[in-house]
Each structure stands twice: as structure tokens, then as C-alpha cells.
Image (spheres, coloured by chain):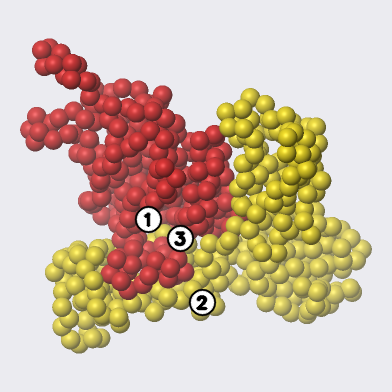
Chain colours: A yellow, B red
Amino acid sequence: MAKLILSMDGLVLKEIPLTKERTTIGRKPHNDIQIDNLAVSGEHAVIVTILNDSFLEDLGSTNGTVVNGNPVKKHFLQNNDVVELGKYKLKFVGDAAPTASGEKADFEKTMVLRPSQMKAAADQAKAATGSVLGGAQAAVAQRAAAVQQVAATATAAGIADKDAVTKPPSAPAAGAPAAAPAAPAKAPAAAPAGATASTPAAAPAAKPGQPLGAIQLLSGANAGKELELTKPLTTLGKPGVQVAVLTRRPAGYFITHVEGANRPTVNGQSIGAAPHSLKDHDVIELAGVKMEFFLKA
Amino acid sequence: MDLSQNLEIATCTDPGMVRSHNEDSIAADAANGLVVLADGMGGYNAGEVASGMATTVIVTEMRQILANSKPYDVDTGSSEEIAARLVRDQVLKANSSIYQAAQSQAQYAGMGTTLVVCLFYDNRMLVAHLGDSRLYMLRDGEFSQVTRDHSLLQEQIDSGIITPEQAKKAQHKNLVTKALGIDPTVEPEIHEYPTRSGDIYLLCSDGLCDMVEDEDIAMTLQTLGKGNLKLAAQHLVQMANDNGGRDNVSVILVRVLREYPGRRGVMGKVFGWLK
């Protein structure tokens, strides 16, 4: 479900899921999102959500509505759009990743093709080709057609989050003699067109724009030595004695205790069991060695 | 034989950043060397119900059976070890429970779940799986995938229609060809592998492997697996969420601390015969 993240001066105030068809924003208390600030009009703006699409509309506010730095009257909200109302910011976080065709569908959810759908699609595929293909090829072709059809149906009907199971081609419903799934298919036409279309896959762990962190040893035999934290994970310390890991994440760098009776300290304070966020020029002490964390420009 | 001194197990499961509820279900029984991970599917809460039933049925039934027999016991009729049959029977039992619930109650219609089950015994493990939840292994710094998904994508890769690189970007990642609870009967894929001391096994739902690159998973296991297995599990989930967390994420990590031979030595066997 799409949501808005309300923040001021970089501080997240709350998250608002867009559950309603109309979500109103304004200073007056009857609004769904009330922002009690004089720069915000009584009825400032409204977000209309239809299925997976959300539209922002300014309701003739005094100071106007700004999206990504541009004043707007009406705007089709895209993932990560930032709506500014005075000092307040509303970040729009969309639903699923947009697909190649531009529609938003939930392709992450595991689905299974039902035998009945399989059969119907197989019959169609047969009728469409009008020719008798060899066992394995036919099975693959029918299979691909069935998948395409089910996926298409699911999308078209707007039930992308409903679930469906694929049957192996060896099932009697496929109407073809048992075909080994591993049988090499020489029918290129069998490849579903959608299979090669791209959806955003796993994002890289560290974004290129992220500032690079490093640590410099302040004490011990290697004092003065610098270590750039380019990897997503860097372990520090002596195995068996005290080990901590520095993780590089989109939200910045974190230090976490891994092993040993004593936990590392940051600026003299022992860190807990949870990952501890590192700020520029924090001083870490670990296994008797002091080091400074800093961000490189 | 209690394996909790021989195997270290850490688990972590999270709904992710997008979904409101967690349809994954995990269970671990270190003493019996049993771990189960299921990724449920089906509308409303049916996914959770299916995966929950799968883990509960398998763990409960196996625990009862293993209280009285050993996986490496030999069946007198077939003169084969009972482990594979045991696991298969419990998977089928879970299958019919889920299937019947789905048939009898309208709100559960069409529910099902993927499954990975590992049973560790006698310096070996038996792996049964259905669908696209996976088992990976880290041995001597080498990270590899043990199970092969029952998914349309995997079939397309096998038949040469698409390359593994294309598969990473494919749309129909989520279509599985086998699942638990969908049909009255099911044939889980079962294999046996030898384990070694120091091995780390990772069972995960697709919420992890779709969101996190294999090399990042491998690096996490390598750097944290030895020192703090629990942290490694949490960090894997964290990485999936940092990358968007579009699906539920579940991981089970099993580290083989020391060997766990099943049968007694030669002398033990001799005494066994004499008894």
C-alpha cells in the first residue's frame, strides 16, 4: 500500500498509509493529515487514490503546494516524490515497483498456476498454433502460454495480489505426454515475451552517491593508519577476544557487536546489542584500540 | 541423540518493508537436527495459515517419531534407512492437512506454501523442498545453492530459453511449479548430502534471494557466521530490507559445530548385534 512519510527538518514525524480514496491535508482538525502550521491552509490539498495510483491536488491554498521543488495544481504522484507544505515535507512511497508496461502490479508475491487455467490456456495455445508440435516442445509452448495468460488475467483483473500455482507439464491436464522440465526446447517462440522485460531487481547495497566512510586508528601499533570502508561489511578486532562489524547501509554506517565479553564503546559509551549508527568523527574503542570514524567528502 | 551441542541454529523472520503481515513461517528443533521454512501464499491470512500448518505439522510429527527411532534406522521390509521415508511422509501429511483445510473452509481456498526441510543426522543432511524457497551452503569459503527452485523461471533457465542473468530481471519470478497444499498429493524433491564440521547452511524465502545479491549473502556468512550466527541472520534480513524489502524475509542458519556420527563404532555395532 502506498504511504506518505511526514517530516520536518529531516525529522520523521509519522507515516500515513493511503487507505482511503480521498486523503485530505490541511491545518483544520477535520483533515486526514492535519498539519497545524500557519503556512498551511485550512483545506490545503487532497490525495485521491484509485487502485495503485495516487493524485495530488492543491485545493486553492494560499501558499501553494510544491512537489520536488515545482509548484503544482494537480500531480500524479510517483514513488519518492516529495511534497512540500511550508516547512513540512511529505514523501510519497509507492506500492510495488512499476513494471515494464508502466502499470503497478505485485509481481513479488508467489503464485501458482491452477491446473484448470493451465488446461484452458493449453487448449488455446493448441488452437492458436493449429499444428501438432512434438511432445516436449508442445508442453513448453502450452506452458508458456498458460503463464502469460494467467499473469495477464491477474493484472487485468486487478487481482495481482491474489494467488494462483503452476502445474508441471507432466500433469495430465497439460494434455501432452510427460515431458521432462529439463528437456531442451528448441522453440524460441515459447519464451514468454514478459520474461525478458525488466523489473528493477535487487538494488545494490550501497548507492553510489553515498558518502564513503573510513576509520583512522588513534592508538596501538598501527596508530595513524587509515582504512576505507568500501565493503558492505568490515569486521574489526581480534577473533575470540572482541569483534565488531561496521556495516555500510543506505542509511549510513553502523557498528554492531559480534563477539567477546565486552562491547565496543562509541565516544566512551558502550553500545547495546542493536546496530549503532555512526556519525562523523565518532571515536570507537575496541579491543583496547581507539579509532576515529569519519566521512570522506 | 541430542544434536544441540553439534549444531548451532539461528533464525530471523520479518514482514519486510512493504507487506503488512508475514506469510513466512519458520521452525527449528536443534535437538532433533530439524529445521523447516515455509513461505505461504493465498489471500487474506491464508498464506500464514498454510505456512504455519506446514512447519507445525512437520516439526510435531517428526519430534514424536524421532523420540522412538533414529533417522538412520534401517527399515526391515525395504532394508533402507527410514530417514527419507519419514521426511516424505510428514511432508505429505502436512500437504493433506493444508489441502483439506483449503477445501473445507472458503476463506482458505487456494492457499499453499513453499517448503524447505532439512534433517541433520549421522554427519549428513536430508533436504526436502517444494517451490522457490532455497537452501544454500557455505563450505570452505565457497558459497553455493543446494536446492533448485520449482519455478517457471528455473525451468526456463534449464531449457535454455533465458539465461540466469535475464532471470534476475524477469517478471514472473513468483510463479512456482510445485507447492504444498495445492493438490491432494505432492512429490517433494528429496536429496541427501554429507555435511562437514564448519559448514554453514542457509534456508531462506525468496524475500532474501530476490533482494540481496549472492555475493553479499556470502560475505555476511563469511564475516559474521563464525563469530555471531544470530547477528548474521539479522544482518541478512536487514540487507533485504535496506534494498527495499518487497517481500517477507525469513532465514534459518545452521552451523555444524562438530561432527555428529549416528551409528556407534565397530565395537558398538558388535555389541549391538550381541544384544
Q: Residue at x 35, y 36 (%)?
A: B196
Disc 1 secondary structure class? loop
- The answer to whether residue B58 of the structure is visible from this angle is no
Q: Which mark is residue B132?
A: 1
Mark 1 surroundings: few (<14), some (14-19) or many (≥20) residues within 10 A: many
Kind of residue at badge 1 = Asp
Q: Residue at x 71, y 60 (%)?
A: A210
Q: Which residue is identified by label 2?
A: A100
From the viewer's perspective, is residue B100 above or below residue B265?
below
**Where in the figure is residue B164, as x and y percent of width and height?**
39, 66
Between A181 and B125, the one nearer to me in the picture: B125
Disc 3 versus disc 1: distance between alpha carbons?
A: 12 Å
User: Considering only order in the chain, which callout, 3 or 2, is on the residue closer to the N terminus?
Assistant: 2
Q: Residue at x 60, y 57 (%)?
A: A205
Disc 2 versus disc 3: distance between alpha carbons?
A: 17 Å
Subunit of label 2: A
Disc 1 versus disc 2: distance between alpha carbons?
A: 23 Å
Residue placed farthest to the front in the image? A221
Would you identify the image quadrant in which residue B260 lies?
top left
Subunit of label 1: B
Kind of residue at badge 2 = Ala
Q: Which residue is identified by label 3?
A: A109
